[in-house]
Every structure is written in C-alpha cells, then in structure tokens.
Image: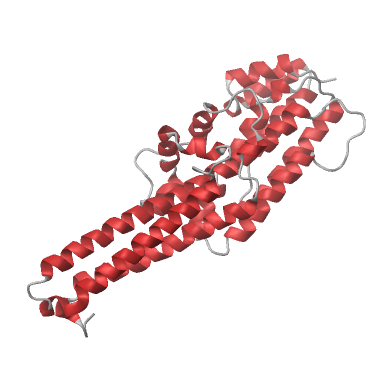
Amino acid sequence: MNRMPKYCNKFLDIIYEVLKSYKKICHNTFSNIVGINVIGTTPTVCHVWFKDENLKQTIRSLPAWSEIYKGGTPEQTTTHAQLVTAISTHLGKEILDKDAMIADSERLIQLAQLQDSIHWLIQYVDSFVENLQCDKELQDQLTGSTKLLEDCRTLLNERMGELLQLAEDCLMILYLEIRVQCYYHLLIVLRKQEYKVDMVNSDPDSGVTLLNKFLSHLEEKIRDFLPPSHTKFLFEGLGYIMSSVIISNASYIKEINNGGLKKMSRNILALQQNLTNITLTHELELERARFYYELLYQKPEEILRNIVEQQKRFTKVRVRGTDTTLLPE
C-alpha cells in the first residue's frame, strides 16, 4: 500500500469483501456441523442448550473462559456446581436421544479447526489494522482520503467482531457437546445396567468405555491446533459433572449388591484414570462419587459417622438418598 497509496482504499474494499465472503462460508460450515437449519435433521441437544442465554452467560463466567477472551478472572465467577444446576434445567427423566447428538467426533474436530482458523485470521487482521493506524507515512500520502481510510478500518473492525463471535460460538458448542456426551453415556450406565451381579467383569461398562474413547480421541486430535488455554477450558470441570451425574442418578438403580458396588467403583476408576490422562491433574471430584458408593458397604452407624466427617462432600438430599434408595447386602 505504501507503493500505491492512491489505491489504498480500493485494496481495503477488496479485503473487506473477501472477509465478508469468508465469514459467510464459515457461518454455513458452522451451521452444517451443528445441524442448524438443515432440512431433515433433528436439532442437536447442544444447539438447544446453546440457545439458552442464561446457560451461556454462566459458562462465560467460568475463569477458564475469561482467561481466553478477557485476559483474567472475572469479578463474578461461576462454579462448576452452578453450571451443573444450569444444565439440569434442560434434562428430563428420559435418557438423551442419540440422534440428537453430534455422534461423529470428526465433525467436532472440524469445528475445532474452524475455530482455530478464525482465531488465526482475527489476530492477523487485527495486526494489519493496527499497522494502518500507526503508519504515518501512508497517512501523509493519503491527504484528503484519511476519512475514507478511517471508515475502512472501522468496517474491518466490525467484520472482525462478527468473526470473533463465530469463533466463540464454535468453542461454546464444543464445550456443550462434550458435556452432552458425558450425560448421555453415564445416564445409560446408571439407568440401564444391572448392578445385582454375582460375577464382576474386570472391564468397565461399555458406556464408560465409549465415553472414555470419545474424550481421549477428541483431545488427542484437537490439541494439535487449539491453544492449551482452549483445551483446558473444554475439559476442565468434567470430573465434577461426571461425579454429580453418578451421584444424582443413584436412585435409578433398582437393586445393587456388593458385586454391583465393585462394578460401579471400577467404572468410576476408569473415568478418573482417563480424565487424569487428558487434563494431567488428579481428578479429585470423582473421589466424591467413589466415596458415596463406598458408604453402601457400611453399617448404618458407620454411614452416619462418615457422613458427619465428610459432610461437605454432599448435600442433604444426597445424604438422604444414600440410606433409602440403595440397599447394600
């Protein structure tokens, strides 16, 4: 532009139109992946959740989100307990419909790639616009055209704002779909599996295995192009959600004996080991679920003593559920 200053605004117009076309392509790609406005498809669960502004605001208040988009911890942060409460408003008594999930992990990987592509372009164009603002020589050559140049910069910034919103939406959908998958598989494990068993297989339930494979495969693929802060946001807090689902749905288990309790402990351990490999932190929240089920091995007086010692781990509702809905041998 320094060599052809008279054509600067025309160059900016071309750049603007290219970005306009790129944004349209990205938006269509996003819609196809998520299943928005696609004829003959069932709206995905994560898209239904995505339309809940209160839920999205709760997620935006998480410290990990603020580290990405706000450069620090917000004044008012969301806890994972509050997030579970917000999600629970969308859950009925029925198990989630498999057809309403993004079952193909490759589509989620494409969504992560789209987010990464948009994020890179935003950084590049922001740098370009900043250089325009700082290039005094170019502005001196554009005598009489400064207003036009400023207008173009404003339009470019507006376009970047639209792309930034789309990048945030991609990350939000990824975050929600990962949690949809957790609810789907764990609800099947808790509501459809038998826990009155004589012989205990050394392997976890198939639902746990499928969930672990999904999470590990997705993390392995997206970490190659998403920044660490993004992957941290996507997988942080999953241990709390898993633990909450396992505890809150204990009442759906009709009968359970010592063999079934060992089976549940194996499921929890498999989830904990897999999640630890992904986040590289010891997932202590799943210890809460393991301890909850260990209460069922104990005599009434032992249960009461342990509840007093560990009362901060559970709500009163969960404590009452322990001695009424599950019957140890």
Q: Tell me what residue is drawn at x 49 percent, y 51 percent.
A: 30
| Residue 239 seen in the current view | no
Q: Where, quadrant-wise, is the N terminus in this rendering?
A: bottom left
Vertical arrangement, residue 253 with respect to residue 111, above or below: above
- Seen in the image, is 110 located left or right of residue 134? right
- Seen in the image, is 74 located left or right of residue 146? right
- Seen in the image, is 193 located left or right of residue 235? right
Q: Tell me what residue is drawn at x 86 percent, y 30 percent.
A: 259
Colour approach in the figure: secondary structure
Where residue 220 appears, as percent x and y from the top left, is 64, 59
* Numbered-mark total: 0
Q: Tell me what residue is drawn at x 42 percent, y 60 percent.
A: 119
Where residue 232 appears, as percent x and y from the top left, is 53, 52
- Seen in the image, is 42 located left or right of residue 265? left
Furthest toward the top, the residue is 324
| Residue 175 seen in the current view | yes
Furthest toward the bottom, the residue is 3
Where residue 233 appears, as percent x and y from the top left, is 51, 49
314 and 217: which one is in front?
Answer: 217
Quadrant of residue 303 in the image?
Answer: top right
